[in-house]
Amino acid sequence: MNRKTFLILIALLVVLGGAGLALFWQDLNAWRKADVKIGSRIFDRLPVNDVAQIRLKDGKGEATLALKDGRWVVRERGDYSASVQEIGDLLLRLPDAKVVQTENVGEALLPRLDLLDPAKADKADNAATLLELSDKSGKVIGSALLGRKVIKIEPSPLPIKQEIPVGRYVLAQGSPTVLVLSDALKNADAKPAQWLARDFFKAERVKSLTASGEGAQWKITRSEEYGQWKFTDGAGQLAGSAATAAVNALSSLAFSDLALELKAENFDKPRTLVAETFDNLTYAIKLARKPDSADYYLSVTVSGEPPRERKPEAGEKAADKERLDKEFTESRKKLDERLKFERGLAAWTYVVAGKALEPLLKDRAQFTAAPRKPPVPGR
């Protein structure tokens, strides 16, 4: 090999080495760009005000929350109203969630962290929850795979362990690095029932309550709002505590889910409750036991119109009239708003816990007070 050939080879090695070094640094810079530093926020640039749809999908189901005609709805529940509070909580938490740990985890270990893409996972329990946020045009503006929650065990005087979610494993879009966020994002689950708005009817100021149908036949009434409850037919002594519990239940019921395909006219062995109020309203409630469950199906319709004018109280002073009239007008306005909402409930069938309905499911004998035992002579 002559000197000229040797110099040419050296020059080629330098060029090739420089190119290789440039490629190395290019790959390193790309890796550094994809990596996320501790303390950073992966959703810090999320345009929260532009979010018009939130899609959550795991190995068992899917929940799609969407803006429709200015309100949030749950697609998988027939566009029933979604909880604005729950959605707002999630959208506020996302930009504030910080990265507190990063892990270079191989793909084989992702199932242990529940971080498999739900579209590819062979087991539902190993699947992540895909969180996908879109704008009104359908463009995805943020996404991540949410994995297992990080649990902290808190000391407790009780023998039961107090487990508190303090973080969550996450795979961010475009990053191969597993992150641990400072927020467990507890409500980010793909369960449609979880996202339903929980507002429900409240039958208040009940004047009479009638039960009929499967296993019940009774009617109780009172002449004044805070008066004593009695059986309408006058037969038997009514247990006041049972009547109070039944009426209180009507103002505090909650539902856990909807039964989209079931209509009230198709209930099996239904029981009907009719509550009439001092506001001239009538709540007709139909119940049926959910098969193989302690829960019940429930439908409700509201009829009647509240009075438009206030009836003066006995002995009312002229000085009090203006104040009482104002209070009446304000209360009627609130009642009208509630009525508009409650009448819309008739289009749906709800699932309600049987335990919450127990005071309303009693038969007449259970509403009857036990006879008092006569006093024993000499005692």
Image (cartoon, grey):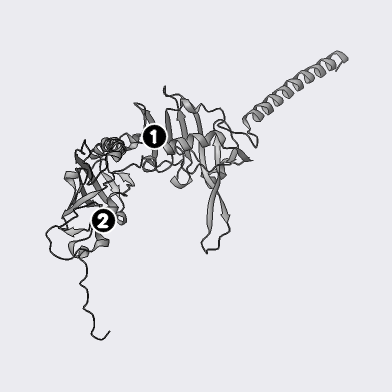
- Element class at badge 2: helix
User: Residue 359 at x, y = what percent?
Assistant: 27, 58
Q: Residue furthest front?
A: 318
Residue type at numbered disc 2: Ala
Q: Which mark is residue 246?
A: 2
User: Residue 267 appears at what percent x and percent y?
Assistant: 19, 48
- The type of residue carrying mark 1 is Thr
* Contact between labelled residues 2 and 1, with CB atoms less than 8 Å apart: no
Q: Secondary structure at mark 1?
A: strand
Task: Mark 1 or mark 2: name the one nearer the start of the chain.
Answer: 1
- Image x and y of residue 349, in percent: 25, 43
Q: Residue furthest right?
A: 3
As drawn, which residue projects farthest toward the bottom? 378
Q: Tag 1: Cα neighbours inside 10 Å, few (<14), some, or many (≥20)?
A: many
Relative to 379, is 109 on the left or the right?
right
| Residue positioned 74% across, 24% down in the render | 21
Q: Nearer the viewer, residue 309 or 217?
A: 309
Name which quarter of the figure residue 113 lies in. Answer: top right
Q: Which residue is mark 1?
A: 64
